Image: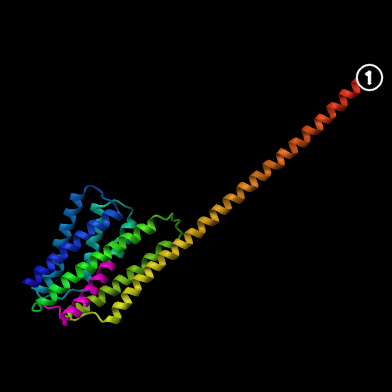
Amino acid sequence: MTTVICLMFSYLYTDFLYVYFYKNILGLKYSLKIAVLGSLCMWIFGIFGKIFPQYIWGVQVTGVTSILMLGVNFVYTILCYASPVKKRILATIIYTIAQAVMDMMGLRIAGMLTGNYELTMSNETFIAAATVCSCMAITLGTFLVTWFWKTIEQKQWKYEKYQWTCVILPISQYMLMQGIATRYSNEARPVPFIVMIGFVLGIITDVYMFFLFQKMNDRKQTETELERMNHQYEVEQVRYEQLKKSQEETAKVRHDFQNYVLTLKHME
Protein backbone atom coordinates (compact mmCIF):
# COMPACT_ATOMS: atom_id res chain seq x y z
CA MET A 1 0.00 0.00 0.00
CA THR A 2 2.95 2.31 0.70
CA THR A 3 4.03 1.87 -2.92
CA VAL A 4 0.65 2.96 -4.24
CA ILE A 5 0.60 6.01 -1.95
CA CYS A 6 4.07 7.08 -3.17
CA LEU A 7 2.97 6.72 -6.77
CA MET A 8 -0.23 8.66 -6.12
CA PHE A 9 1.69 11.58 -4.62
CA SER A 10 4.17 11.40 -7.49
CA TYR A 11 1.33 11.61 -10.04
CA LEU A 12 -0.24 14.49 -8.10
CA TYR A 13 3.02 16.46 -8.14
CA THR A 14 3.68 15.90 -11.83
CA ASP A 15 0.09 16.77 -12.74
CA PHE A 16 0.52 20.13 -11.00
CA LEU A 17 3.65 20.69 -13.10
CA TYR A 18 1.27 20.65 -16.08
CA VAL A 19 -0.34 23.79 -14.67
CA TYR A 20 3.02 25.57 -14.56
CA PHE A 21 4.00 24.48 -18.08
CA TYR A 22 0.68 25.11 -19.82
CA LYS A 23 0.04 28.40 -18.00
CA ASN A 24 3.36 29.77 -19.26
CA ILE A 25 3.13 28.30 -22.76
CA LEU A 26 -0.57 28.28 -23.67
CA GLY A 27 -2.07 30.84 -21.29
CA LEU A 28 -5.06 30.37 -19.01
CA LYS A 29 -8.50 30.16 -20.60
CA TYR A 30 -10.49 30.97 -17.48
CA SER A 31 -8.62 31.12 -14.15
CA LEU A 32 -5.87 29.37 -12.22
CA LYS A 33 -8.45 27.65 -10.02
CA ILE A 34 -10.08 26.03 -13.06
CA ALA A 35 -6.68 24.85 -14.29
CA VAL A 36 -5.87 23.34 -10.88
CA LEU A 37 -9.27 21.61 -10.78
CA GLY A 38 -8.58 20.20 -14.25
CA SER A 39 -5.23 18.85 -13.03
CA LEU A 40 -6.96 17.16 -10.10
CA CYS A 41 -9.40 15.49 -12.50
CA MET A 42 -6.49 14.34 -14.66
CA TRP A 43 -4.77 12.98 -11.53
CA ILE A 44 -7.87 10.97 -10.60
CA PHE A 45 -8.00 9.58 -14.12
CA GLY A 46 -4.34 8.56 -13.86
CA ILE A 47 -5.01 6.76 -10.58
CA PHE A 48 -7.91 4.71 -11.92
CA GLY A 49 -6.46 4.40 -15.42
CA LYS A 50 -2.91 3.34 -14.61
CA ILE A 51 -1.93 3.02 -10.93
CA PHE A 52 -4.85 0.94 -9.66
CA PRO A 53 -5.02 -1.40 -12.70
CA GLN A 54 -1.28 -2.08 -12.60
CA TYR A 55 -0.54 -2.23 -8.86
CA ILE A 56 -3.90 -3.09 -7.23
CA TRP A 57 -5.86 -5.07 -9.78
CA GLY A 58 -2.88 -6.72 -11.49
CA VAL A 59 -3.85 -5.60 -15.01
CA GLN A 60 -1.01 -4.91 -17.42
CA VAL A 61 -0.85 -1.36 -18.77
CA THR A 62 -0.80 -1.29 -22.57
CA GLY A 63 0.10 1.26 -25.19
CA VAL A 64 -3.61 1.92 -25.70
CA THR A 65 -3.80 3.15 -22.10
CA SER A 66 -0.91 5.54 -22.72
CA ILE A 67 -2.53 6.90 -25.89
CA LEU A 68 -5.80 7.32 -23.98
CA MET A 69 -4.02 9.27 -21.23
CA LEU A 70 -2.40 11.47 -23.89
CA GLY A 71 -5.88 12.15 -25.31
CA VAL A 72 -7.18 13.07 -21.83
CA ASN A 73 -4.23 15.43 -21.47
CA PHE A 74 -5.14 17.10 -24.77
CA VAL A 75 -8.79 17.47 -23.69
CA TYR A 76 -7.49 19.06 -20.48
CA THR A 77 -5.62 21.69 -22.53
CA ILE A 78 -8.77 22.42 -24.55
CA LEU A 79 -10.91 22.95 -21.45
CA CYS A 80 -8.46 24.93 -19.32
CA TYR A 81 -6.06 26.79 -21.64
CA ALA A 82 -6.33 29.21 -24.54
CA SER A 83 -4.21 28.68 -27.65
CA PRO A 84 -4.57 27.45 -31.25
CA VAL A 85 -5.19 23.72 -31.64
CA LYS A 86 -1.85 23.08 -33.38
CA LYS A 87 0.02 24.70 -30.52
CA ARG A 88 -1.89 22.64 -27.94
CA ILE A 89 -1.15 19.38 -29.75
CA LEU A 90 2.54 20.14 -30.15
CA ALA A 91 2.91 21.35 -26.55
CA THR A 92 1.12 18.24 -25.21
CA ILE A 93 3.25 15.80 -27.19
CA ILE A 94 6.59 17.49 -26.51
CA TYR A 95 5.95 17.91 -22.79
CA THR A 96 4.67 14.33 -22.43
CA ILE A 97 7.80 13.03 -24.14
CA ALA A 98 10.00 15.19 -21.91
CA GLN A 99 8.18 13.95 -18.79
CA ALA A 100 8.49 10.30 -19.83
CA VAL A 101 12.20 10.59 -20.62
CA MET A 102 12.98 12.40 -17.37
CA ASP A 103 10.84 9.86 -15.45
CA MET A 104 12.84 6.97 -16.85
CA MET A 105 16.08 8.79 -16.07
CA GLY A 106 14.84 9.19 -12.49
CA LEU A 107 14.14 5.46 -12.31
CA ARG A 108 17.61 4.74 -13.61
CA ILE A 109 19.21 7.03 -10.99
CA ALA A 110 17.09 5.48 -8.23
CA GLY A 111 18.25 2.03 -9.31
CA MET A 112 21.87 3.14 -9.18
CA LEU A 113 21.35 4.52 -5.66
CA THR A 114 19.50 1.51 -4.25
CA GLY A 115 21.17 -1.21 -6.30
CA ASN A 116 17.76 -2.60 -7.22
CA TYR A 117 15.58 -1.97 -10.27
CA GLU A 118 12.50 -4.06 -9.50
CA LEU A 119 9.37 -1.93 -9.85
CA THR A 120 7.16 -4.14 -7.69
CA MET A 121 4.82 -3.68 -4.74
CA SER A 122 7.26 -5.33 -2.31
CA ASN A 123 10.25 -3.20 -3.27
CA GLU A 124 9.23 -0.13 -1.26
CA THR A 125 12.79 1.24 -0.97
CA PHE A 126 13.21 1.46 -4.72
CA ILE A 127 9.71 2.93 -5.16
CA ALA A 128 10.43 5.70 -2.64
CA ALA A 129 13.79 6.50 -4.22
CA ALA A 130 12.31 6.39 -7.71
CA THR A 131 9.50 8.74 -6.67
CA VAL A 132 11.94 11.34 -5.34
CA CYS A 133 14.41 11.03 -8.23
CA SER A 134 11.71 11.06 -10.90
CA CYS A 135 9.96 14.10 -9.41
CA MET A 136 13.28 15.99 -9.31
CA ALA A 137 14.14 14.97 -12.87
CA ILE A 138 10.69 15.86 -14.22
CA THR A 139 10.84 19.25 -12.46
CA LEU A 140 14.17 19.98 -14.14
CA GLY A 141 12.78 18.83 -17.48
CA THR A 142 9.71 21.05 -17.05
CA PHE A 143 11.81 24.17 -16.49
CA LEU A 144 14.09 23.31 -19.43
CA VAL A 145 11.21 22.67 -21.85
CA THR A 146 9.44 25.87 -20.73
CA TRP A 147 12.61 27.92 -21.20
CA PHE A 148 13.28 26.36 -24.59
CA TRP A 149 9.71 26.92 -25.82
CA LYS A 150 9.73 30.58 -24.74
CA THR A 151 13.10 31.12 -26.42
CA ILE A 152 11.79 29.73 -29.70
CA GLU A 153 8.49 31.61 -29.36
CA GLN A 154 10.28 34.96 -29.22
CA LYS A 155 11.30 34.47 -32.83
CA GLN A 156 9.08 35.63 -35.66
CA TRP A 157 7.98 32.51 -37.49
CA LYS A 158 6.95 32.22 -41.11
CA TYR A 159 5.23 28.94 -41.80
CA GLU A 160 5.83 26.95 -44.93
CA LYS A 161 3.03 24.97 -46.53
CA TYR A 162 4.17 21.55 -45.27
CA GLN A 163 6.10 22.65 -42.19
CA TRP A 164 3.38 21.25 -39.89
CA THR A 165 4.53 17.73 -40.82
CA CYS A 166 7.41 18.19 -38.35
CA VAL A 167 4.94 17.12 -35.65
CA ILE A 168 5.21 13.55 -37.04
CA LEU A 169 8.69 13.23 -35.51
CA PRO A 170 7.72 13.76 -31.84
CA ILE A 171 4.50 11.75 -32.33
CA SER A 172 6.45 8.75 -33.65
CA GLN A 173 8.98 9.12 -30.83
CA TYR A 174 6.18 9.19 -28.27
CA MET A 175 4.53 6.04 -29.64
CA LEU A 176 7.85 4.18 -29.79
CA MET A 177 8.87 5.31 -26.32
CA GLN A 178 5.54 4.40 -24.74
CA GLY A 179 5.66 0.95 -26.32
CA ILE A 180 9.12 0.26 -24.96
CA ALA A 181 8.39 1.77 -21.54
CA THR A 182 5.14 -0.21 -21.21
CA ARG A 183 6.91 -3.46 -22.03
CA TYR A 184 9.63 -3.00 -19.45
CA SER A 185 7.16 -1.69 -16.88
CA ASN A 186 4.98 -4.77 -17.23
CA GLU A 187 8.06 -6.97 -16.86
CA ALA A 188 9.11 -5.02 -13.72
CA ARG A 189 12.60 -4.25 -15.02
CA PRO A 190 14.31 -0.98 -15.98
CA VAL A 191 14.71 0.36 -19.47
CA PRO A 192 18.25 -0.42 -20.72
CA PHE A 193 20.77 2.39 -20.63
CA ILE A 194 21.32 2.25 -24.40
CA VAL A 195 17.58 2.77 -24.95
CA MET A 196 17.68 5.76 -22.60
CA ILE A 197 20.48 7.23 -24.70
CA GLY A 198 18.30 6.74 -27.78
CA PHE A 199 15.43 8.61 -26.13
CA VAL A 200 17.73 11.49 -25.12
CA LEU A 201 19.17 11.67 -28.64
CA GLY A 202 15.60 11.81 -29.94
CA ILE A 203 14.87 14.85 -27.75
CA ILE A 204 18.11 16.47 -28.94
CA THR A 205 16.98 15.81 -32.51
CA ASP A 206 13.69 17.60 -31.83
CA VAL A 207 15.57 20.56 -30.38
CA TYR A 208 17.93 20.66 -33.36
CA MET A 209 14.93 20.53 -35.70
CA PHE A 210 13.51 23.67 -34.09
CA PHE A 211 16.85 25.44 -34.35
CA LEU A 212 16.96 24.54 -38.05
CA PHE A 213 13.50 26.06 -38.44
CA GLN A 214 14.74 29.13 -36.61
CA LYS A 215 17.70 29.53 -38.96
CA MET A 216 15.44 28.97 -41.96
CA ASN A 217 13.04 31.65 -40.76
CA ASP A 218 15.89 34.06 -40.04
CA ARG A 219 17.15 33.51 -43.59
CA LYS A 220 13.68 34.08 -45.03
CA GLN A 221 13.30 37.28 -43.00
CA THR A 222 16.66 38.50 -44.28
CA GLU A 223 15.65 37.70 -47.87
CA THR A 224 12.33 39.48 -47.38
CA GLU A 225 14.07 42.54 -45.95
CA LEU A 226 16.55 42.53 -48.86
CA GLU A 227 13.70 42.33 -51.38
CA ARG A 228 11.97 45.22 -49.64
CA MET A 229 15.14 47.32 -49.74
CA ASN A 230 15.69 46.47 -53.43
CA HIS A 231 12.12 47.46 -54.22
CA GLN A 232 12.55 50.70 -52.30
CA TYR A 233 15.78 51.39 -54.19
CA GLU A 234 14.02 50.83 -57.53
CA VAL A 235 11.23 53.20 -56.49
CA GLU A 236 13.78 55.83 -55.50
CA GLN A 237 15.55 55.36 -58.82
CA VAL A 238 12.30 55.98 -60.70
CA ARG A 239 11.66 59.10 -58.63
CA TYR A 240 15.19 60.31 -59.30
CA GLU A 241 14.80 59.82 -63.04
CA GLN A 242 11.48 61.65 -63.00
CA LEU A 243 12.94 64.49 -60.97
CA LYS A 244 15.95 64.70 -63.28
CA LYS A 245 13.68 64.77 -66.33
CA SER A 246 11.52 67.45 -64.72
CA GLN A 247 14.59 69.58 -63.95
CA GLU A 248 15.82 69.23 -67.53
CA GLU A 249 12.42 70.31 -68.89
CA THR A 250 12.36 73.25 -66.46
CA ALA A 251 15.84 74.29 -67.56
CA LYS A 252 14.80 74.06 -71.21
CA VAL A 253 11.71 76.18 -70.61
CA ARG A 254 13.80 78.75 -68.70
CA HIS A 255 16.30 78.87 -71.56
CA ASP A 256 13.54 79.35 -74.17
CA PHE A 257 11.96 82.06 -72.05
CA GLN A 258 15.26 83.90 -71.75
CA ASN A 259 15.72 83.74 -75.54
CA TYR A 260 12.20 85.08 -75.98
CA VAL A 261 12.93 87.99 -73.63
CA LEU A 262 16.16 88.83 -75.50
CA THR A 263 14.33 88.72 -78.81
CA LEU A 264 11.73 91.18 -77.51
CA LYS A 265 14.47 93.56 -76.31
CA HIS A 266 16.13 93.52 -79.74
CA MET A 267 12.79 94.20 -81.39
CA GLU A 268 12.42 97.37 -79.30
Quadrant of the image for the C terminus?
top right
Residue most extreme to the right: 267
Closest to the observer, 109 or 220: 109
What's the residue at 23%, 61% (across, down)?
Answer: 73
SS for callout 1: helix
What's the residue at 48%, 58% (across, down)?
Answer: 218
* Amino acid at dot 1: Met
Magenta stretch contains residue 112: yes
Q: How is the structure coloured here?
A: rainbow
Is residue 162 shown to the viewer in this render?
A: no
Residue 78 falls left or right of residue 165 = left
Residue 97 falls left or right of residue 265 = left
Which range is magenta? 97-120
The chief SS type of the magenta part is helix
Rendering coords of residue 207 (x, y %): 38, 67
Rendering coords of residue 26 (x, y %): 30, 54
Name which quarter of the figure residue 253 lies in. Answer: top right
| Label 1 Cα crowd, 10 Å radius (few <14 / some 14-19 / many 20+) | few
Indicate whether 128 appears above or below 219. below
Magenta stretch contains residue 147: no
Tally the marks: 1
Rendering coords of residue 158 (x, y %): 45, 56
Indicate whether 148 appears above or below 250. below
